[in-house]
Amino acid sequence: MVPSESTEVNSKWDQIRTIYETTSQDCLGFKQGKKMKKWITPGTWKVIEERRHMNKKILDTKSERLQERHKASYRVLDKNVKRMARADKRAYMEDLAKQAEEAAEKGEQGKIYKITREICGKFRSNNDVHIKDKNGRLLTTEEEQKARWAEHFKEVLNRPAPDEEAIIIEALQDLEINTNLPERQEIITAIKALKMENHQGRTILMQNFSKSTQNLQLKFFNLYLRKIIPDDWTKGIIIKLAKKGALSDCNNWRETTSNWFSSL
């Protein structure tokens, strides 16, 4: 690739990425993550929200008479939240105990071990498992584990080219696949099919995307014809998924990559 062409492609891709990021941020904003305790039922969360709104009323109200009324309502809601939360946790623990009994009858020792650790508050996901180096030494520090994962994925993903080219047999019949460039309306339909929770933001987002669709189509068409991709498309985040076997061995994990190109 000629350096000037690479610079031009990366510059155009930066424009496209900016369109997506700024428009999505302005219309939808960032989704605030909330760590929810999984044993709390939706009904209890609803009462928790009511208690939170009542507390906001107390803080916003200047009248002492109304404050006392809101405080009385808040105390009732607070008692209900604590009572319901205790009942939810008790039911959750009983369900775990039932699952442990069923696992014991089936001889599933691994499941019993996980349930026991979760009940004791010491449950750990698979991603927290310590791994070993090539010599079998257990790596305990975060820096050592990161270095081992980097070494493992470099070996797995950067394999040398095969000595012999693959023999590809010519197909007896060509499949009827439309290889033409997508039309503007097809791009708009694909964007509308995206799942979004913020419906008001989605409407504004669709309007802005629809206006810029023709510009995006021309940019992607240019990349398609020149067979050149931006540098961002060659980068991604590796997500590791556990397989069967000892998880301390890196070979018992499979990887998948998430990047900008996979989301388009």
Image: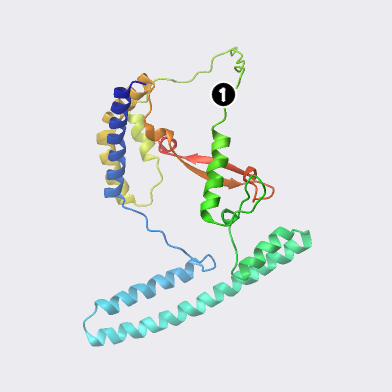
Label 1 Cα neighbours within 10 Å, binned few <14 / some 14-19 / many ≥20: few
The picture quadrant where one finds residue 10 is top left
The location of residue 235, given as percent across then percent down, is: 43, 37
Q: Position of residue 125 (x, y in %)?
A: 58, 57
Left or right for 201, reference 94: left
Identify which amino acid the numbered label 1 is placed on: Ala
Q: Residue at x 40, y 20 (%)?
A: 180
Residue nearer the viewer, 17 or 213: 17
The residue sitting at 45% across, 69% down in the picture is 45
Pointer 1 residue: 161
Residue at 37% in and 55% down: 31
Q: Quadrant of the N terminus?
A: top left
| Position of 159 relative to 207 (above/below) | above
Q: Establish if 157 lies above or below 81.
A: above
For numbered disc 1, what is the local secondary structure? loop
Position of the C terminus, as image quadrant, is: top left
Question: How many numbered discs?
Answer: 1
- The percent coordinates of residue 232 (x first, y second) are 38, 35
Which residue is at the front of the view, 142 or 201? Answer: 142
Using the image, determine if residue 59 lies above or below residue 33.
below
Residue with the most extreme left position: 62
Front in this rendered view, residue 259 or 141: 141
Whole-percent x, y for residue 52 in the image:
36, 73
What sort of colour scheme is used for the picture?
rainbow
Q: Residue at x 42, y 35 (%)?
A: 261
Q: Is residue 221 above or below residue 105?
A: above
Q: Nearer the viewer, residue 127 or 74?
A: 127
Residue 216 occupies quadrant: top left
